[in-house]
Amino acid sequence: MNAALTFQIHHRLDGALARTGSIITPHGTIATPAFIPVGTKATLKSLTPEQLANVGAQAVLANAYHLYLRPGADILDEAGGLNAFMNWDKPTFSDSGGFQVMSLGVGFKKVIDMNGMGSDKPLGKKEKLAWIDNEGVTFKSHLDGSKHRFTPEISMQIQHQIGADITFAFDELTTLHHSYEYQVESLNERTHPWAVRSLTEHQRLNAERSHRPPQALFGVVQGANYEDLRRQSARFLAGLDFDGYGLGGALTKENIGEIVGWMSQELPEDKPRHMLGISEPDDIFACIENGADTFDCVSPARVGRNGALYTLDGRVNITNAKYRRDFSTFDSNCDCYTCKNYTCAYLHHLFKADELLSNTLATIHNERFIVRLVDDIRASISDGTFFDFKQIYLTRYYAKK
RNA sequence: GCUGGGGUAGUGAAGCGGUCAAACACAACAGACUGUAAAUCUGUCCUCUUUCGAGUUCGCAGGUUCGAAUCCUGCCCCCAGUA
């Protein structure tokens, strides 16, 4: 009913679930498939919005948990919303804080592992900061230890104050280390009821806050790597009036495409599907082939800040000694600002000297690399060359590893 | 010249008779990072060995001791104060 979001499909790929399309939001249109960089705290670390736009980003994704703690969602509301606050005029997404329920709770780091190593050892050495129940989550701020509580309703209230074009339902992100029984319980007792509650509150807020552009809400599918649970979760959410869907949670890398395919088959054709937290080239190809439309991920930015840069031949660490006297540009195949203007030796030096510009230049390159990859995939769907492109690209990318 | 302090691995710096190949920090080298508790984290870092382990070290040369980076003697350097 509301005009929060329109999704149009332009091309479909024969023999696969891949499609190209347009997501039309109050702040503009996103050509899909698309990679959406993450600006957790209303900034993509080390980049100005202009630099972010120049990298080709069509939208940015912020996080309700972080903005709630600082500066406070009310401040974003007063500022006129996320776009105005951060001086970004293109579409925006906000995550619900659901990820933090996991990362602050059952564990840190290891639980995101997609290889299902089967390790169920203590998940991180840090103190547990979040406790989940069927109503919501109580957590301690990682900033000052103060106690807070998120429920689906509160998350939606925060996300409406943040004012992103696309919001996500408050969910529980489980891990591959959780048992099947736990996955079932999580779905039935929390993620699904919370989706209903998120939607109800969201609709109420959209009506109440009619002075602001209508916001869209994506339901989040969970179910780890179990086919029955993924299909059941997708089917359940498909029955609700969401504007689109987030495909989240514990995905095994080896069959990530298959898992996405299960969900795509159950979800409505005409709603966009967003992959939460995915950005490795092989994963991106697999997900798009199986029906994913958009992606967000911190990895290109974080990995870049730590000195790892993408190339068509795989990821390399620019901090390696072999770059010390390498006065060639980093990647002659890349059209980003960094690669057009700086040498390997200079980038190497910036990292070694711990200079702030290293973060900026590396982030520009990595974000451009992944954004462009998805842009190229989109083009390959339109002209029907997707499978050739995928084969050639991935063969080269993983040749050395 | 005298008086006092000091010379420890790439650097700084602990150790002051045995559990010391020698804490710690930095540098160096390599790796990791998938809805950001990340400008973070992990490993290596005298030599040889894949591991186990073996072999040489604590300014230099002697000595005491079952045993020395640690004690003694001489020498060589450095720093501070003073002639």
Image (cartoon, rainbow, N blue to C red):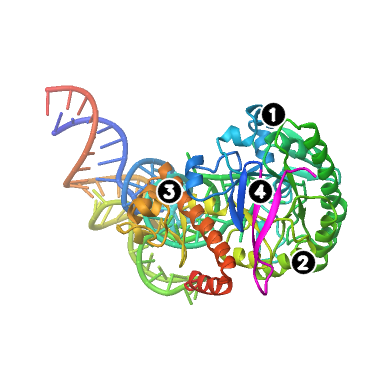
Q: SS class of the residue under badge 1?
A: helix
Q: Of A152 and A69, which appears nearest the observer?
A: A152
Q: Are marks 4 and 3 on the same chain?
A: yes
Residue occupying image coordinates x 85% and y 59%: A184
Of the residues under marks 2 and 3, which one precedes in the sequence?
A: 2
Query: Is residue A139 inside the magenta stretch?
Result: no
Residue occupying image coordinates x 78% and y 37%: A206
**Amino acid type, callout 4:** Ile
Q: Are marks 2 and 3 on the same chain?
A: yes
Residue A360: image quadrant is: top left
- A184 relative to A106 in the view: left or right: right
Q: Are marks 3 and 1 on the same chain?
A: yes
Of the residues under marks 3 and 1, which one precedes in the sequence?
A: 1
The disc at residue A361 is 3
Nearest to viewer (mark 2 / mark 3):
2
Rendered view: A260 above or below A365: below
Residue under label 2: A265
The disc at residue A74 is 1
Q: Position of residue A382 (x, y in %)?
A: 58, 66
Chain identifier of the residue bearing label 2 in the image: A
Q: Position of residue A319 (x, y in %)?
A: 41, 55
Residue under label 4: A24
Of the residues under marks 1 and 4, which one precedes in the sequence?
A: 4
Tally the numbered discs: 4
